Amino acid sequence: MKASYVWIVLAGMAVANYTLRFIPIAMLSRLKLPRPVERWLSFIPVSVMAALLVGEVLRPDGAWLPPLQNPYLFAAIPTALVYRKWRSFLGTTVAGIAFFLVFRTILG
């Protein structure tokens, strides 16, 4: 396969991706959306993050772990409590890493 073909495909995918994302955002940013639609759209980032997080916690590396042997699951619970208490992304990240290391050591 020629390197120029790969670069052409890559550039085409970048243009298509940018176009499909930019045009709707540019159009919607100029409109005043009804309050229920704005509220509905506000849940999208949280939903996407939850879907990504749950998948990685329950199936790390694409494999199911038994719940009582899953350090990811054990670490996620106190990490969520840390975030709920202090609402600090950095603090929660550090706490999550620490909890994971502790539970990985305990569970082997």
Image (cartoon, rainbow, N blue to C red):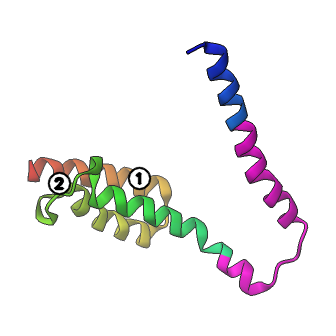
For the record, the magenta segment spans 14-40
The residue labelled by disc 2 is 103
In the rendered image, residue 68, in percent from the top left (x then y), is placed at 11, 64
Identify the residue at image location x=66%, y=79%: 40
The residue lying toward the viewer, choosing from 77 and 91, is: 77
Q: Quadrant of residue 3?
A: top right
Q: Quadrant of residue 59?
A: bottom left
Does 98 appear above or below 75? above
In the rendered image, residue 87, in percent from the top left (x then y), is placed at 49, 66
Q: Are marks 1 and 2 in contact (CB under 8 Å)?
A: no
Q: Earlier in the sequence, mark 1 or mark 2?
A: 1
SS assignment at label 2: helix
Q: Is residue 99 left or right of residue 87?
A: left
Q: Amino acid at mark 1?
A: Thr
Identify the residue at image location x=13%, y=47%: 105
Mark 2 residue crowding within 10 angstroms, few (<14) / some (14–19) / many (20+): some
Identify the residue at image location x=49%, y=62%: 49
The residue labelled by disc 1 is 93
Mark 1 residue crowding within 10 angstroms, few (<14) / some (14–19) / many (20+): some
Residue 31 highlighted magenta (yes or no): yes
The residue lying toward the viewer, choosing from 43 and 90, is: 43
Residue 23 highlighted magenta (yes or no): yes
In the rendered image, residue 74, in percent from the top left (x then y), is placed at 22, 62
SS assignment at label 1: helix
Q: Quadrant of the N terminus?
A: top right
Q: Main secondary structure of the magenta part?
A: helix
Identify the residue at image location x=19%, y=55%: 71
